[in-house]
Amino acid sequence: MLTINKENNKLTIKSDCMGQYKNKVLSLCSDYIKDRQGFGYSGVMVVIRELLTNAIVHGCQQDGCGRINLTIIPLKNCLYEITISDSGQGFDHSKIKPRNIPEDPREIKNRGYLLIYQLSQKVTFNKRGNCITAQVAAQ
């Protein structure tokens, strides 16, 4: 089941099996930001796509089922705060070297985090590593 809430100028989407709704969720997020921004929101969508994919692949079971919460809050100056949490075990995010391009370009590990960090003004994790918040400017 997919729960969508647009309240107090923020968008919240919750699901126990987000994997089956990924495209719909991305479309809802895109429409929400486009309605507020009108232009220059592709970087925000790249970050949302990467965060959502990571939550589905790493935070949920193989079938994409597991609790995922996504919240988008518009801040001032075309800045958006995106928070995604999942019901997974989390991970040790201190091992990510987010600003470094992988030495072997064929290696795909952590490329999503590279994109997230490059496109975001600020990125924070909770201690457990199953919730990430990124602040991204629409430009």
Image (cartoon, rainbow, N blue to C red):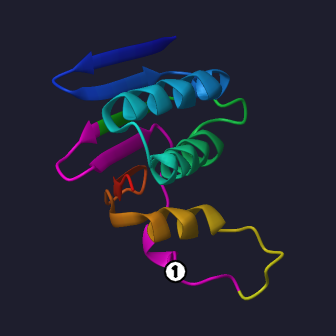
* Magenta stretch in the rendered image: 73-102
Question: Residue 92, image x and y in percent?
Answer: 47, 67
Please name whichever residue, 38 or 122, is drawn nearer the observer in this view of the structure. 38
Q: Residue at x 30, y 47 (%)?
A: 80
Pick the quarter of the image with the C terminus. bottom left
Instruction: Using residue 37 as the reference point, say whether residue 115 is left or right of it.
Output: right
Q: Residue at x 41, y 14 (%)?
A: 3
Query: Is residue 65 in view?
Result: no
What's the amino acid at mark 1?
A: Lys
Please name whichever residue, 70 or 120, is drawn nearer the observer in this view of the structure. 120
Question: Residue 4, image x and y in percent?
Answer: 39, 16
Please name whichever residue, 21 or 57, is drawn nearer the observer in this view of the structure. 21
Whether the magenta-drawn stretch holds residue 51 is answered as no
Dot 1 corresponds to which residue?
97
Above or below 75: residue 95: below
Label 1 SS: loop
